[in-house]
Image: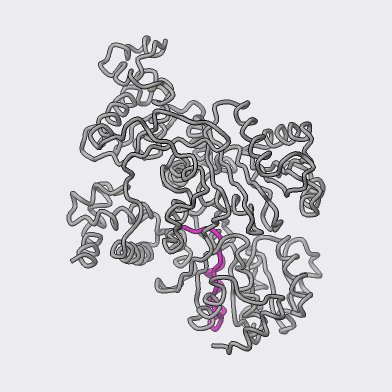
Amino acid sequence: MLPSDDFAAALARFGHAGFRPGQREAIETLLGRGRLLLVAPTGGGKSLTYQLPASLLRGTTLVVSPLIALMQDQVASLERVGMRATYLASTLAPGEIRQRARDIANGVYDLAYVAPERLATSGFRSLLTDLDCPLLAIDEAHCISEWGHDFRPEYMQIGEVLPLLPKARVLACTATATPVVRDEILARLGLAADTPQILRGFARPNLSFRASEIESKRDRQRQVDAALAEALGAPGSERGCAILYSPTRRTAEEESQRLLELGWAADCYHAGLPGSQRETTQQAFTERKLEVVVATNAFGMGIDRADVRAVIHLGPPGSLEAWYQEVGRAGRDGDRALGLLLYAPNDFPVRRNLIERGSDGIPPSSEVVEHKWNLFLELMRWAEGGSCRHDAVLRYFGDEDETLEGCGICDVCVEVTREDSEHDPEEVSLVVRKALSGVARVHGRYGLMAAAKLLRGESDERLTRSGLDRYSTFGVLRDRSEAWIQRLLRRLVTAGWVSFEGGDRPVAVLTQVGRSVMLGEIPPRIVLPPTRVRRGVAQRTAARAPVPPTELDPVGQALFEALRAWRLETARSAGVPPYVVSADRSLREVAMLRPRNRDELLLCHGIGPTKADRYGEAIVALVREATP
């Protein structure tokens, strides 16, 4: 371990008077244990955890990063503090790449950034065999996971490179990684299950998280305008800037033009625009010439503007991880900022269709489809949830230590409304089973709108033509509004009891678990939508009904970690990703419910007869060992 004086001198060299929370612990763990998986939010100071050791250790530290613009900025910053640094990327001329590679081999540099695809070349691997490398840092490490939100195949090369650097310490850094993704990172890199994992700085108490369902394009525009007025004031007020994330390029162009006409200094950014135009927009944003950028998710990587007062999503991204990474670009100066997620009823079937299409015209496997669908459902569960949004995010990422027990500024904490009466478990069960029976009637034929009309008892040509208006299910929830029934049905989708199939014209289907809930074989742990709704910029509809437990006690947390270690070893033995063995949500429910036999295990989310037969004995044994 290095003396404190060395740390102090290195900090001063980088222009810092002290460490941010968790930084010193991370550096000491890395230097002492030689292995570390660090999860900290964007802008949380992860780069110092490898740059500072690189300035102190003998040899050339290698940093794997997919962001060429970030490499360039970091190298320039390191050179300003007197460190010898460089980078290798495809944007360099071949001759320049060869010269820099020779200099790296000769030990000219203290630190070198390399793009992940560089690891696949035989020339670079040959260079590594004789390199004096004290540290290999992997930035954006979640990209190594096939089950994460931003998988990049070239990251799969990293595990093959590590044996070429047997003396190097290894640091894997990421801003967003759930427990199952963290476990896969360790598996792909060949690191031991007891590799230290540090989660720090996930709580963003200065951000007001909000989610609001929109009813129309006009409603979306109204909410955007109100949020911008709240965060930035009027155009030209010089109170900072905002980023609007759009699900499509067309919407990005239309919305940026609308805001421009309203007087905002606004521009558009997406991958379909010429490179020169994208560069001009990004530079104008960095130089504070723009107040609003409306963009697809192509914008923002490597952006470090501290005065972003609002991040608004015009539609939901594919996962809670993707949303949290993007919304985390707000409020980096520590001042109050808002993150608003807007979503609509048709987002569910649209997202399902996009997932099934895959990319490059190659349909993904059913396993990948279901995993990505579940990632999206986790985001929508968060959007529809009834607890503090900050705490829900922290628990999702497994950062129990930073939960706030209510942040006081998210829309759930501020705008929550009380229903006329609380729902008891029997009422919840009855209503949910009725709703699922409606879905069972339209199963494989129609969508959720038809199911809502069936339950409400509304006349509809499709129901009449198919004779569904003659069943006892017709009008079984006629005492509820159609809008309320639609909200309930969407909650059934996020619970995993209803799904979609059918491509461009998706229809609703009852899942196997949904059928079990409908038949009363599994209790429905769900909160019914509220019967009264208040609207505003931060619309929130949540009931003060009994909420299923989401927080683990100390015994449950220890059991959850034991189950993770078992999952990692089981996945390695079978040669499959950890998610194939079990999802985080399943392990968390096991840790909460603590099943003592197979029948009780089947009550846990995502554990059906096949998994119970395959893994049930091992899981129940762990439960019994943890809770004698």
Residue 559 occupies quadrant: bottom left
Tell me: 615 left or right of 156.
Answer: left
At x 79%, y 75%, the residue is: 80
Is 402 part of what is drawn in magenta?
Answer: no
Q: Which residues are magenta?
A: 156-178
Q: Is residue 521 above or below residue 239?
A: above
Q: In the rendered structure, does residue 158 fall within the stretch colored magenta? A: yes
Q: Quadrant of the N terminus?
A: bottom right
Left/right of residue 396 with respect to residue 310 in the rendered view = left
- 208 vs 9: above or below: above
The residue under the point 64% across, 55% down is: 335
Q: Residue at x 74, y 76 (%)?
A: 85
| Vertical order, 280 against 133 (above or below) | above
Q: Residue 610 location in percent, x, y?
A: 26, 49
The quadrant the C terminus occupies is: bottom left
Spot occupied by residue 329 in the image (x, y as percentages of width and height): 63, 53
Q: How many marks?
A: 0
Q: Nearer the viewer, residue 519 or 568?
A: 519
Residue 316 at x, y = what percent? 55, 40
Q: Is residue 327 left or right of residue 389?
A: right
Q: Residue 65: x, y in percent? A: 64, 65
Closest to the observer, 123 or 404: 404
In the depicted structure, whether residue 245 falls above or below residue 619: above
What residue do we see at 53% from left, 75% from top? 26
**In the figure, is residue 489 to the left or right of 289?**
left
Q: How is the image coloured?
A: one colour
